[in-house]
Amino acid sequence: MKLELTVPSMACSACVDTISKAIAGIDPAAKVEADTKTKRVAVETDATEASVKQAVESAGYPVS
Ligand SMILES: [Cu+2]
């Protein structure tokens, strides 16, 4: 399943790293593509959208 999240506070590659690791924590096989300009995070995962959102938010990045 492909999810699209918007993460307004994602500003640089360190943010992308933190977000990618948070998502890997719930699904190590997830593919994460993040664009700091558009603030979009595309995630290819078997995890639910709610659990991905929760992981990103617990890493300190609110999902809008
Ligand atoms: Cu950053």
Image (tube, helix red, strand yellow):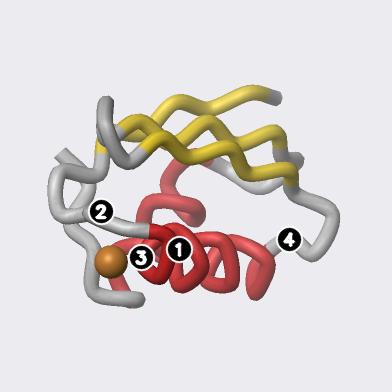
Is label 3 in contact with label 1 (beta carbons under 8 Å)? yes
User: Which residue ends up furthest to the right in the rendered image?
Assistant: 29
Res 56 → quadrant: bottom left
Q: Any atom of ligand 1 within 8 Å of the CB at mark 3?
A: yes
Name the image quarter holding the N terminus: top right
- The residue sitting at 52% across, 71% down in the picture is 22
Disc on the earlier residue, 4 or 1: 1
Q: Quadrant of ligand 1?
A: bottom left
Q: Nearer the viewer, mark 4 or mark 2?
A: 2
Disc on the earlier residue, 4 or 2: 2
Disc on the earlier residue, 2 or 1: 2
Q: Any atom of ligand 1 within 8 Å of the CB at mark 2?
A: yes
Q: Mark 1 points at which residue?
A: 19
Q: Which amino acid does label 1 sit on?
A: Ile
Q: In this view, does 62 lie above or below 55?
A: above
Is label 2 in contact with label 1 (beta carbons under 8 Å)? yes
| Mark-to-mark CA distance, 3 and 1 | 6 Å
| Mark-to-mark CA distance, 4 and 3 | 18 Å
Q: Name the residue under label 2.
A: 10
| Mark-to-mark CA distance, 2 and 1 | 9 Å
Q: Mark 3 points at which residue?
A: 15
Name the image quarter holding the C terminus: top left
Q: What residue type is labelled 4?
A: Asp
